[in-house]
Image (spheres, helix red, strand yellow):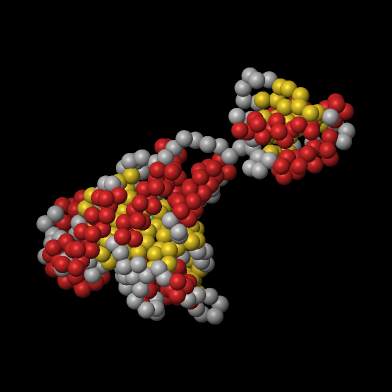
Amino acid sequence: MHDTLPAEMHLWHTLEDTVRGVFSSYGFEEIRIPVVEKSEVFARAIGNATDVVEKEMYSFEDRNGEMLSLRPEGTAGVVRAVLQNNLLYAAPLRLWYMGPMFRRERPQKGRTRQFQQVGAEVFGAAGPDIDAELQVICQRIWQALGLNGLRLEVNSLGTSQERARYRHDLHAFLSAHKDALDADSLRRLDRNPLRILDSKNSEVQKLLQDAPVLTDYLAEESRNYFAGFRALLDSYGIAYHVNPRLVRGLDYYCHAVFEWISDDLGAQGTVCAGGRYDGLVEIQGGRPWPGVGFAMGQERLIELMRTQAEPVREAPQVYLIMAGEGTTERGLKLAEMLRDDIPGLKIQSNLGGGSFKSQFKRADRSGATLALVLGEDELKMGHATVKHLRDETGQEQVAIDDLVSWLSEWLNS
Ligand code: ATP
Ligand code: MG
């Protein structure tokens, strides 16, 4: 679990502001749900035989004996909240969320035990138009963040009946080739053989080249659904690759599933993953509402922004230096007035006193572009000295009464 330090906070803010703006432009509403839920909320939704529930959840017994878990993902809790608060009366419902998730997995590059996800969940829309719109939303977010090289992989998981028949045949095939399976795959063989499809082991991947393919098990309705999804992606001009081995780690998916992947992140290159989960609301105790959604890993996006996007810094624009009799009182009031009158102005006041010299040092370290200096002489004359800290423009005197218009003009130049 990592700290997010002030120096990288501007990246987080840019990401958060961007997704907030894009979601709202598509009519999505934000939902915030607790970090802790009853363990059964996740066990039921995600499935007991998944890695997440089997070995990655942080669970503990409450004082009254109830089992609780830190949320490993957002979808199960959002479904719980939607049902509990009767939000489906307004279906179709388009929701998004953002927040920390917890999974006890082996820490490695791009994989931590606390991480942030941005997610979208849509209930009551049968698709495939909404499934395609989710990809447009993703693409718009990548563009707004200045990210390049993200590719979309899609697959169809069909219905649970189709998957059951496939699972049976895949299990038979893999059981006949047990000697080529690693320990991880052997563990999954009986409980969740589809998960073996996205094994990272090259021996296993070689074996899978001859394994039965899920696509061959889809009946006409599922094939039409998937064709409709792909046709919409084409008409939006979104490039994609059909990966027949793309399965999702969670049990609840059906029909269209997808991942957005970057090759610039090493082994953990998936920045967004999701799909359709038509059975999930029913599993959680509601009527069978269709559902579809995705989750983005924010740390992985931040990593891409760090390397690909233009750097910006959230330093103050103005550092207020005050030295001499009466200057602090006058200066702090002035700063409040400037914040009132110039929306968005970032001004940091020097607190704790100090000589001009030491205050200028702090101004420099703050990253501010402009120092606003108020000494006893300035107070007497009714002006402030503005000094440009990052270039050779030098300094000038500005009447205190003119500061609002001077600073506004400077900000816009
Ligand atoms: P994987 O097969 O890589 O374990 P997953 O199926 O567990 O993926 P999801 O549950 O779909 O992943 O999560 C969606 C996204 O959240 C991932 O694509 C990734 O970007 C991010 N994510 C998931 N787990 C972690 C983690 N432990 N650390 C950082 N980001 C994560
Ligand atoms: Mg995982």
Quadrant of residue 166 within the rendered picture: bottom left
Choose between 109 and 16: the one closer to the eye. 16
Q: Work out whether residue 29 can be spotted.
A: yes
Left of 148 or right of it: where is 337? right
Report how many numbered discs are placed on residues in the image.
0
Q: Is residue 42 above or below residue 354?
A: below
Where residue 390 sits in the image (x, y, percent)? 62, 25
Q: Nearer the viewer, residue 318 or 42?
A: 318
Q: Position of residue 117 (x, y in %)?
A: 44, 56
Residue under the image location 45 percent in, 68 percent down:
78
Can the viewer see residue 365 in this picture?
A: no
Expressed as whole percent of the image width and height from the top left, the position of residue 278 reads 32, 70
Can you say whether 200 is above or below 149 in the image? below
**Side of 3 where 355 appears, left or right:** right
Query: Does 273 sit left or right of 349 as displayed?
Result: left
Q: Residue at x 16, y 56 (%)?
A: 208
- Residue lying at 42% horizontally and 75% vertically, measured from the top left: 40
Examine the image and state in which quarter residue 219 appears. Answer: bottom left
Residue 64: horizontal and vertical position, in percent? 54, 80
305 versus 356 height, above or below: below
Which residue is at a point 56% across and 37% down the rendered structure image? 313
Q: Quadrant of the C terminus?
A: top right
